[in-house]
Structures are given as C-alpha cells and as structure tokens.
Image (tube, rainbow, N blue to C red):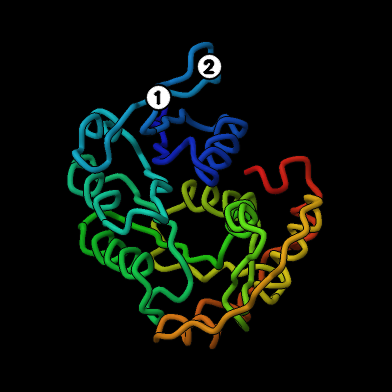
Amino acid sequence: MSNPILVTGGTGALGRQVVSQLVAAAGRPVRIASRRERPAGDTVPYEWATVDYKTGAGLAAAVSGVSAIVHCAGSYFDTSVEDALVPVAIAADRPHLIYISIVGIDRIPFGYYKAKLAAEQVVIGSGLPWTILRTTQFHDLVFRAGDALSRSPIVPLPAGVPVQPIDSAEVADRLVELAAGPPAGAVPDMGGPQVRDATELVRIYLRSKGKRRLLLPIRLPGKAFRAFKNGYHLSEDHAVGRITFEQALSTPVGGKR
C-alpha cells in the first residue's frame, strides 16, 4: 500500500471536500489532521490525527510517513503563521507540500494576507518539494459574511469593491489533482467565473434567505481598502471557475458550507 496523503484542516470547508474526493478516488490512503477529536461512529475509511497547530502537539504523528500534505488549515481570525510553520518544520520524510493561498497577497497590505504571504515564504524555503495554488475568494466567504452581517438591521459594506468568487469544490478538485502529481512550484491562479460587486452579492444572498436588511455601502480609509477597490485580489486572466454565485447559492449546501 502506498503512503497516505495528509489533509490538514481536513474538517474545514475546503479540507473536507478535498478529503471526500481523495477517499472517493481510492487511489491511496488518506489521513486527516484536525483540531477536533474524531467523531464517535465515524466509519469513513481514512486515518485521523488530532493536532494542535500552534504547539505542534500531535503533528509529528500526523506527518509521519505521508507522501504529500495538502495544507488547508488556517483561520481568518488568526493571522499567525504557525499553521504553516509547524508541519513544515517537522516533516522529516520530505513529502510533497501543497499549500492553498490567495490571489493578491503580495499587493494588498491586509493582516491576514500578510500572514499568508509569510507562510508562502516558509513553504518555499522549507527545503521540501512544494506546490502553491492561489485562488480568489470562495463563495462560502460571502455566505458567511452575509450570515454574520445580517444579525444587524443595518449592514455596512465596503463600497465599490469587486470580488471574483470561486466554488470551493472546484478548488478541491484542483488540489487533489496537484497532490497526485509532481511538485510544480507556483502554479497558475484560479479565479471565479465572474467579477461582481461585493454589495450586490450580499444583497442576493440575503434575498435568497428571505432577510430584509438596509445595506449601507461605506468608503473605508487606508491602503488595504484602496487595493481591494483597485481589484488587486482579482485574477481575470485566470477565470477558470465554472460555478457562478447564483448556482452555488442554489445547491443544497449553498450558504451552509
């Protein structure tokens, strides 16, 4: 039997789709690294490793003997780079490291983007064979933002900001393809099929959920807002995604990923 592929963040919105596709392919064993314990009664044929990405507890066992690491672990609310540093530092078996990143992180002075760019540099300098895929924002991000913002009767939104959302399932397809292949370095970006106005998409999302809210576009100060308004996070030359925002919203899991 060949060595397993490890998916960090394997229970997250993107990671669980990568895991599902790898398991369905049945080409080689799959191992999940998650902050959570394995749920009781989970009989899916994958290995499970419970880890603490900050302290490194459990990660030595998680990366032991793997042939590839699809690194999906991360958080919008934690701008530290430990999630990338720890598995790289202890991956003594030199697996192929596939890292998911974001278009525009080298052009937008935004805290989370700075952390992702620093993590990329760690991956590149790790000495491991590596592949980095940058994508535009996921539909899921708009869904979550809509849910969070709709708790108030007035929804403030950044005015005039374009977005190019892509479906996370399509990104998972690409990550699985990259994990099956040789290290490729920085591969072409993946962008969604359409560039849309962020306020428009939130309005569409809220309408689909039957929520009536007053949307209040506001102009924010600072270099990061100007960079987003200028579209530095877009990848119109690589609009390879096929699933539109409305199509994603109409699926059974639309807005719940």
Circle 1 SS class: strand
Seen in the picture, residue 33 relative to 142 is either above or below; the reply is above
Residue 104 horizontal side relative to residue 140, left or right: left
Seen in the picture, residue 131 relative to 67 is either above or below; the reply is below
Residue 61 at x, y percent in the picture = 25, 28
Q: Residue furthest front?
A: 153
Q: Which residue is painted at 43% across and 62% down in the image?
A: 101
Q: Amino acid at mark 1?
A: Trp
Nearer the observer, 212 or 6: 212
Nearer the observer, 151 or 122: 151
For the N terminus, the image quarter is: top left
Q: Mark 1, residues whose alpha carbon is within 10 Å: few (<14), some, or many (≥20)?
A: some
CA gap, disc 1 to disc 2?
10 Å
Q: Earlier in the sequence, mark 1 or mark 2?
A: 2
Nearer the observer, 210 or 96: 210
Q: Which residue is painted at 39% across and 28% down in the image?
A: 36
* Residue at which label 2 appears: 42
Label 1–label 2 contact, CB within 8 A? yes
Seen in the picture, residue 36 relative to 130 is either above or below; the reply is above
Q: Amino acid at mark 2?
A: Asp
Q: Quadrant of residue 153?
A: bottom right
* Residue at which label 1 appears: 48
Residue 91 at x, y percent in the picture = 22, 42
Residue 147 horizontal side relative to residue 103, left or right: right
Q: Quadrant of residue 87?
A: top left
Circle 2 SS class: loop
Seen in the picture, residue 128 relative to 51 is either above or below; the reply is below
Q: Which residue is painted at 73% across and 62% down in the image?
A: 213
